[in-house]
Amino acid sequence: MCGIAGVINFEPGRPVERQLLARMCDAIVHRGPDGSGYFVSDGVGLGHRRLSIIDLEGGAQPMANADNSVVVTYNGEIYNYRELRAQLEARGYVFRTQSDTEVVVHGWSEWGADCVRHYNGMFAFAVWDARRKCLFLARDRLGIKPLHYAVVDGDALIFASELKALLAHPRLQRQLDERAVEDYMALGYVPEPRTILASVSKLEPGHTLLVDQRQGASLQPQRYWDLPCTPLAGAGEAELGEELLRQLDLAVQRRMIADVPLGAFLSGGVDSSAVVASMSKLAAEPVLTCSIAFRDRNYDESIYAQRVAEKFNTDHYSREVAADDFSLIDDLAQVYDEPFADSSAIPTFRVCAVARQKVKVALSGDGADESFAGYRRYRWHCHEERVRRSLPRRLRQPLFGTLARVYPKLDWAPSFLRAKTTFSALSSDSVDAYFDSVSRCAPAVRAALYEQSFARRLQGYSAVENFHSHAARSPVADGLGLVQYLDFKTWLPGDILTKVDRASMANSLEVRVPFLDHEFVEWASGLPAAYKLRGRDGKYLLKTALRSRLDKDLLYRRKMGFSVPLAEWLRGPARAEAGERLGESRLGQLGVFDVDRVQNLLERHASGQQNNATVLWSLLMFENTVSRIFSLR
């Protein structure tokens, strides 16, 4: 696991400054504190920061073939590199190291742009081909590893693992992408391919980008993978459960290859417990597991983690942290570079710090909810879909639209009385309704918060357009399959994987995700909906299959997840600081939000009249991050 950066000038004779490359790599030293390396030639510069995991002595980068005609800088792990190495050796390629990086070097020579189709792993890499005068950028299928790029002044392309490395380039244009702001305020993250800066893009998951040095800035990313959702042949529940466990064990086994200490996160939830159960089955020695405990028992799952640790006799390490950990807000802005409003980034950062004290690689349970329909919102969406299918839109829209307008917004009431959102969803189509269910801030609230000139610059753009563009390419149209597909394209890479990558790499920790083995994901995408969501049970088949490994009360207890007491913070210890950060002298400088309306939201929250914690946290993270980008502090 590493950090990468590079420059390609569109004039081959114009050299790349080595000092510039070093500054870009120094900005991401946390991703690779074990070493650095640089390659500069023919108007191209590749940089690398290394976190040594495999072949500690021989895996230095950038890595070249024997005649230096192919050079690679690479972040990630190719789990099937040994099988691929054997194939390449049979075709005459000579290997000088035991590193998976060398498979990427020779893989390009043998397969060209199709090399990515051979790799099982998480990766973001750049290949310079001196003979063809081209730079090839690639990102893994699910978006586990990040890759950002930008064209600078029309005469060069720069790329890096994180935005902060691109910000080290003196000619990078720093202008807010207004549409990215709208996306962020709706979702709490900036979805691919946008970033918060108009000049910078993220390479989307499952995409490559070929840059011809002689043709310059004509950039056309190419998709090489998509979620197939191909229905599985008619096997029974028992056979499917056995196959699920076989696929999980294989995915875990692939991710246990390392030349450094390896362990696992253990929250006590279904997904991390399933990974630990599989690791314990495969490992000769007790698995090292890490968790955090909260002093506030409303947020604490450590008792369940301890039970799983005892069941599998793991070497368990737990550390107690305060749930009211508001002190991390400035660190988060530095870690995430662009606005990121998922407050579970705080405990995620803390558990990564705890794990790094014991291991250099940790396996996590991320990705199971998306494949096996674990989120409660899937259940509600399917309920609503049944109503939408039973009534034509010409009847639904006026009926439920009217009810949504007249029904009061009862944030304080029990959930069964908060029907306004449900009425609104039933009056909408499937994509609009699902978008509203995952949005952090309603369209009317966003519109009211924007400063008038900023709202005009949006030209009517709404963040829901991103969802509609993905839905148009979805291979499935049924209610559950469609929203799972949307999550794989937006929520998973934009929120979950971004959160874990930045939090782990800030602590120089590699996190591997067995549930996102692409072969496992492809298989799971073909499961019938009834094996994912049945009645009130999400992850139906997963839980059924795991009964042979995990206790029933753990499998079926209420899902908690990492959460923090935002509402209490913003009425208590963080109230004064939030007022300052969201005032005219700080937030007002950015020219995006109406500060008076923001302050009104804060006052109504502090008084207890409303719960505005989610939107206020989004605004706090926006102010903190964007002010850093524009050096307003």
Image (cartoon, rainbow, N blue to C red):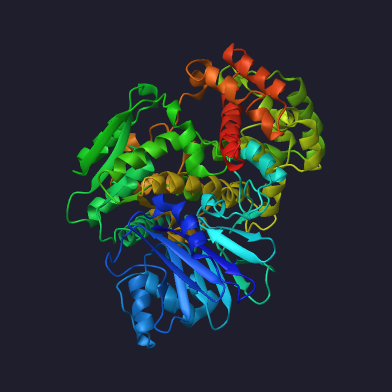
* 305 relative to 616, above or below: below
Give the quarter of the image for residue 349.
Answer: top left
Image location (x, y in percent) of residue 247? 37, 59
Q: Nearer the viewer, residue 305 or 294?
A: 294
Residue 272 is left or right of residue 612, and the answer is left
* 193 relative to 270, above or below: below
Q: Is residue 392 visible?
A: yes
The extreme bottom residue here reads 92
Image location (x, y in percent) of residue 229? 56, 59
Q: Is residue 227 visible?
A: no
Which residue is at 72% across, 20% downward? 407
Image location (x, y in percent) of residue 621? 56, 34
Q: Quadrant of the N terminus?
A: bottom left
Q: Nearer the viewer, residue 382 or 352?
A: 352
* 602 relative to 397, above or below: above
The extreme top residue here reads 607
Q: Quadrant of the C terminus?
A: top right
Image location (x, y in percent) of residue 163? 55, 51
Number of residue marks? 0
* 513 relative to 420, above or below: below
Q: Which of 595 and 172 is in front in this view?
A: 172
Give the quarter of the image for residue 588.
Answer: top right
Residue 540 is left or right of residue 412, and the answer is left
